[in-house]
Image: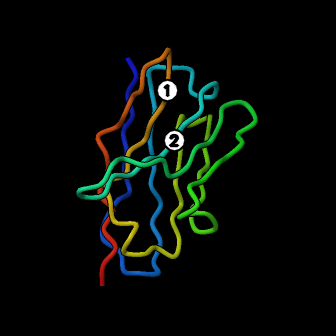
């Protein structure tokens, strides 16, 4: 079965950095696009970044372009989100996602809090 396990969240000051990791299992990882979403209190879940399978192309939400970088290590079945120049608006629970066979799979989420 598909499993996604996020790690790397925490409390960071504005301007700081964090790297999130998502370890995936239960499917042929390299073939699938992987995404990071986030959900802030009282807001809908939103797409932050996506990395495609195969050529590894990437897309980003406008709010994080130039600050966040998504990457993947197919040998480790892991996708990363490097977050730099963090702002208070980035505070949210961050979720790893894969769409497979018309189903959306989610990890348990990892909390990122940006505060002084």
| Residue furthest out toward the right | 55
Q: Quadrant of the C terminus?
A: bottom left
Give the class, few, some or many, for how many residues have Cα within 10 Å of label 2's Cα (few <14, many ≥20): many
Task: Tally the marks.
Answer: 2
**Residue at point 58%, 44% (across, down):** 50
Residue 57 is marked as none
- In the rendered view, would you say 20 is above or below 113? above
The x, y position of residue 29, in whole percent, is: 56, 27
- In the rendered view, would you say 20 is above or below 2? below
The x, y position of residue 22, in whole percent, is: 44, 43
Question: N-terminal of the two: label 1 or label 2?
Answer: 2
| Residue furthest out toward the left | 42
The x, y position of residue 7, in whole percent, is: 36, 50
Q: What residue is shown with label 1?
A: 99
Dot 1 falls on a residue whose secondary structure is strand
In screen coordinates, is 28 left or right of 12? right
């Amino acid at each position: 079965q598909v499993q996604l396990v996020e790690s790397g969240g925490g409390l960071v000051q504005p301007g700081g950095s964090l790297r999130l990791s998502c370890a995936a299992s239960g499917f042929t990882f390299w073939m699938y696009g992987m995404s990071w979403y986030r959900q802030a209190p009282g807001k809908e879940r939103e797409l932050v970044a996506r990395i495609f399978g195969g050529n590894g192309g990437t897309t980003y939400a406008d709010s994080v372009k130039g600050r966040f970088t998504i990457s993947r290590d197919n040998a480790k079945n892991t996708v990363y989100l490097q977050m730099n120049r963090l702002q208070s608006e980035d505070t949210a629970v961050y979720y790893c996602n894969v769409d497979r066979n018309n189903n959306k799979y989610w990890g348990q989420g990892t909390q990122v809090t940006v505060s002084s």
